[in-house]
Image (cartoon, helix red, strand yellow):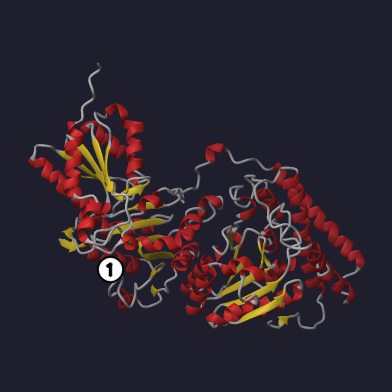
């Protein structure tokens, strides 16, 4: 296996530590609340939670700038929150309300927020990768210095679109940062049961681009790897692949019988809960006190409560608007 | 001025590239090779490899890259060599290009133009002879057009680039070398209305794309028998110009739809259903259809000819329809 990149030993910056922890907590509490709302029937359809995977979203996005583009998947609440999109409109989107980020049209799987250069929410596995290549191509042609970060899971690696996109981005030396959140399962099919080469970072070799495996449970490692890859790409380097090794603690969508993995395996991964790990580290390094931690928890809980209130206050889009925006109105 | 369909498309591409720096062309063999149908011949030399981009054989990736570049404020023109290969990019077309505007609550448009060759008639056998534009016309969120004349070939591209949403242009593969009179006064053309290509009072022949020529020839033959057929070129399959069809049928009271796709689930079926819904009481006979035989298109010429709509089969369908009269009540 490829050596897994760990965070460089360094002093833990208080401000950064608190920001990372706070954002990971926000993602966790937000999704726990979403699960509750789902059980109450206030969120319907598919709801894919990333509980356990907070470090990949928060670390990677912290390594980007606001000018960079983000293309994501159907398990993207964490990416959207880490990007700084307001929790209220995200929760409203999950509830199908007109004050949601996508006006309630897309729901959990299709968060779009163009103001934050958050270009979706793609729910067909690997379908976002070609779009990311196109965004990077547009930037190249327009002379924008930004990079495009594209999240996808290990399941996507089996799709042709993954290989076509890596090849095209490498061929044209486009600044696409391919971020594979490897949670070891393509829905219910274990990595070793769907990949002949389970070391995903090595897939980059076939396209002549750098590929690095990162401990996706270590937010600092993810942040450092992303920042370093992004910096190299901003200097005109072509695409890169980061394999962020992580684990989904809950079902693929809201409920599944989890016949495909053992309780022992899940329990073992929970020992590496990215939030617990980072909390301990921050406390040990003196970057955070117990009192500050309690205060962060309180703030985050209040923020989630406000998001729910925002969603609840939202209206449903009038049925009269059903056909609106199938096409762009002539005036715009 | 007479020009070929190929020259019309090339002129349209050149004008688009020269007129808007956001426009660029990408697809298989559009550059060094000059385009599989030579539509982009010379453009690489004129505009350079950044704007005339040869792609790998990765239909999904380069159509998807077109979607992404459109989201990124460019105006890509994607050439998918033929509709047969577009099947490898359907995910990007159906799941992404067509949905993003509505699904994002109107936040982003996808100003993408995709051109591709379609149709049979060149003895290239079952896997290179599809007419699947009717499938695309099924999908809300995109515009589907089929230039049948050199004038539409010349000007529809510009109309597509001015459309803020995805536009698919289907160019029948038998048309590229056809010569026609370019009507420069027709520009700019719309992507909304059907055109009456030959007026007539006795029956309406509704067609598009590669079948227009055959249908016009059939109308000429019929005129020799004293039957004045009106020929409508749909031009655009989505949105369908229903009003033009209804207006014509209100005058002629009969209609035959000519469509090179297979009959089952065809666009001809959609046209026929619209007439049944909206023109039932104007009709003196059931709507007729001339479509391809329900068979993978065969290679040998005699079998391919037999599989596709041809001028004599169109003439025969019209003659048959004109014989039909409502049965007298017994």
Across and down, in percent, residue A56 comes to: 71, 69
- Where does the image place residue A214, in percent across and percent down from the top left? 70, 77
Where does the image place residue B326, in percent across and percent down from the top left? 23, 25
Q: In which quarter of the image is the N terminus of chain A?
A: bottom right
Would residue B164 be visible to someone looking at this image? yes
Q: Decide: few, some or many residues near mark 1? Use Cα within 10 Å; few <14, some 14-19, many ≥20.
A: some
**Residue underneath mark 1:** B37
Residue plotted at (59% across, 74% down): A177
**Residue B167 placed where, x, y %?**
39, 56
In this rendering, the answer to whether A9 lies above or below A90 is below
Q: Residue at 33% x, 69% y: name it.
A: B18
Above or below, comparing residue A176 to residue B167 in the picture: below
Say left or right for A285 vs A148. right
Name the residue nearer the viewer: A140 or B34: B34
Q: Splitting the image into 4 quarters, where does residue A267 fall?
A: bottom right
Q: Closer to the camera, A37 or B319?
A: B319
Q: In the shown orientation, is residue B218 left or right of residue B90?
A: left
Label 1 resides on the chain identified as B
Query: Could you tell me if residue A237 is visible in this image?
Result: no
């Amino acid at each position: 296996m490829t050596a897994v990149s760990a965070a460089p030993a360094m002093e833990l910056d208080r401000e950064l530590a608190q920001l990372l922890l706070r954002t990971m907590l926000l993602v966790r509490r937000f999704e726990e609340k979403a699960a509750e709302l789902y059980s109450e029937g206030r969120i319907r359809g598919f709801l894919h939670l990333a509980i356990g995977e907070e470090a990949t979203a928060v670390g990677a996005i912290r390594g980007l700038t606001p000018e960079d583009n983000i293309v994501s998947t159907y398990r993207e609440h964490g990416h959207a929150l880490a990007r700084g999109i307001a929790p209220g409109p995200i929760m409203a989107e999950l509830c199908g309300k007109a004050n949601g980020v996508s006006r309630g049209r897309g729901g959990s799987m299709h968060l779009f927020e163009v103001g934050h250069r958050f270009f979706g929410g793609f729910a067909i596995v690997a379908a976002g990768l070609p779009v990311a290549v196109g965004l990077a191509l547009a930037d190249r042609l327009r002379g924008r210095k930004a990079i495009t970060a594209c999240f996808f899971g290990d399941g996507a690696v089996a799709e042709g679109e993954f290989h076509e996109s890596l090849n095209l981005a490498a061929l044209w030396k486009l600044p696409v940062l391919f971020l594979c959140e490897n949670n070891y399962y393509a829905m219910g099919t274990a990595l070793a049961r769907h990949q002949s080469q389970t070391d995903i970072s090595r897939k980059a070799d076939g396209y002549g681009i750098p590929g690095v495996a990162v401990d996706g449970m270590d937010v600092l490692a993810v942040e450092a790897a992303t920042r370093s890859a992004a910096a190299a790409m901003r200097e005109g380097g072509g695409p890169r692949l980061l394999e962020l090794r992580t684990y989904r603690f809950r079902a693929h969508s809201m409920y599944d019988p989890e016949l495909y993995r053992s309780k022992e395996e899940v329990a073992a991964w929970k020992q590496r809960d990215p939030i617990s790990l980072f909390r301990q580290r921050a406390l040990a390094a003196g970057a955070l006190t117990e009192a500050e931690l309690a205060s962060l928890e309180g703030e985050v809980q209040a923020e989630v409560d406000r998001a729910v209130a925002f969603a609840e206050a939202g209206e449903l889009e009038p049925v009269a608007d059903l056909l609106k925006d199938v096409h762009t109105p002539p005036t715009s | 001025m007479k020009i070929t369909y190929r020259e019309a498309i090339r002129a349209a591409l050149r004008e688009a590239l020269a007129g808007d720096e956001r426009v660029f062309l990408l697809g298989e063999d559009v550059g060094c090779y000059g385009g599989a149908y030579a539509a982009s011949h010379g453009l690489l030399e004129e505009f350079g490899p950044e704007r005339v981009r040869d792609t790998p054989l990765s239909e999904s990736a380069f159509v998807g890259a077109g979607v992404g570049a459109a989201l990124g404020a460019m105006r890509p023109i994607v050439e998918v060599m033929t509709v047969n290969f577009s099947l490898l990019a359907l995910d990007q077309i159906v799941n992404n290009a067509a949905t993003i505007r509505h699904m994002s609550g109107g936040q982003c448009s996808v100003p993408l133009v995709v051109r591709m060759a379609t149709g049979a008639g060149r003895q290239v056998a079952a896997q290179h002879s599809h007419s699947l534009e009717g499938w695309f016309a099924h999908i809300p969120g995109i515009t589907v057009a089929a230039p049948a004349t050199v004038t539409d070939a010349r000007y529809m591209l510009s109309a597509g680039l001015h459309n803020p949403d995805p536009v698919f242009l289907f160019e029948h593969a038998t048309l590229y070398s056809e010569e026609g009179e370019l009507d420069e006064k027709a520009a700019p053309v719309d992507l909304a209305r059907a055109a009456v290509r030959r007026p007539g009072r006795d029956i309406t022949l509704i067609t598009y794309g590669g079948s227009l020529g055959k249908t016009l020839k059939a109308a000429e033959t019929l005129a020799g028998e004293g039957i004045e057929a009106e020929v409508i070129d749909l031009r655009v399959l989505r949105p369908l110009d229903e009003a033009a069809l209804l207006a014509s049928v209100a005058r002629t009271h009969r209609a035959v739809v000519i469509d090179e796709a297979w009959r089952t689930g065809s666009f001809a079926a959609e046209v026929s259903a619209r007439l049944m819904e909206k023109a039932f009481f104007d009709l003196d006979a059931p709507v007729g259809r001339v479509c391809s035989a329900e068979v993978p298109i065969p290679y040998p010429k005699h079998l391919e000819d037999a599989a596709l709509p041809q001028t004599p089969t169109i003439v025969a369908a019209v003659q048959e329809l004109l014989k039909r009269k409502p049965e007298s009540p017994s």
